[in-house]
Image (tube, rainbow, N blue to C red):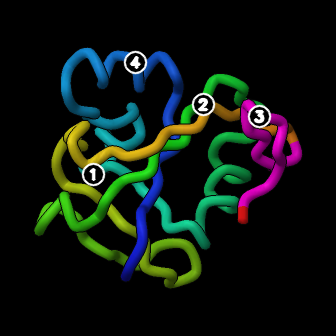
């Protein structure tokens, strides 16, 4: 797979990760034993299913090449391969960030007012 992968995370959680130098994952991530990531093609559905109605989010682009063998592609929703990270996410692998909200209908709305995901 090529291109970045993405993590949707609460702003407060991400601020704590920045202070710590790594993101240990959400409560759900820690319970599952890995950090859930999404490809660009999977992102809109992830936002709709798991983040609808949240206005306090950051979308973080992640360089999969920087994660090495700790990143595994595993079947999930509908058999699609999802990126799962089996270690804390180092900030050195994190790229551009965008603040956003996910409306109740699941549409992502970015801080600059653009909606959707392309």
Residue at image location 18% in from the left, 59% down from the top:
67
Q: CA distance from mark 2 to mark 4?
A: 11 Å
As measured in the structure, the alpha-carbon distance from the residue carrying label 3 to the one carrying label 2 is: 14 Å
Alpha carbons under labels 1 and 3: distance apart? 31 Å
Q: Measure the alpha-carbon separation of dots 3 and 4.
A: 20 Å
In the image, residue 89 above or below residue 69: above
Crowding at mark 1 (Cα within 10 Å: few <14, some 14-19, many 20+): many
Numbered badge on residue 15: 4
Q: Which residue is mark 1?
A: 34
Q: Quadrant of the C terminus?
A: bottom right
Element carrying mark 3: loop
Q: Quadrant of residue 94?
A: top left
Q: Within 10 angstroms of label 4, few (less than 14), some, or many (20 or more) residues?
A: some
Magenta stretch, residue numbers = 105-117
Image quadrant of residue 41? bottom right
Q: Nearer the viewer, residue 6 or 92?
A: 92
Question: Residue 85, how many percent across, how many down?
Answer: 26, 56
Quick check: is 74 in the magenta stretch?
A: no
Residue 115 is situated, as x and y percent measured from the top left of the image, at 83, 48
The local secondary structure at tag 1 comes to loop
Q: Secondary structure at mark 4?
A: helix
For residue 68, side relative to residue 41 (left or right): left
Please tell me the numbered disc located at residue 112: 3
Residue lying furthest left in this view?
69
Of helix, strand and loop, which mostly describes the magenta segment? loop
The numbered disc on residue 57 is 2
Q: Earlier in the sequence, mark 1 or mark 2?
A: 1
Of 84 and 3, the residue lying toward us: 3
């Amino acid at each position: 797979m090529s291109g970045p992968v993405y993590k949707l995370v609460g702003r407060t959680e991400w601020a704590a990760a920045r202070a710590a130098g790594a993101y240990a994952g959400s409560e759900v991530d820690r319970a599952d034993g890995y950090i859930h990531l999404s490809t660009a093609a999977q992102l809109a559905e992830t936002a709709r299913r798991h983040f609808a109605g949240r206005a306090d989010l950051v979308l973080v682009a992640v360089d999969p090449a920087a994660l090495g063998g700790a990143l595994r592609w595993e079947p999930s929703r509908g058999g699609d391969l999802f990126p799962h990270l089996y270690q804390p996410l180092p900030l050195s692998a994190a790229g551009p960030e965008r603040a956003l909200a996910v409306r109740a209908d699941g549409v992502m709305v970015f801080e600059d007012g653009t909606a959707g995901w392309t």
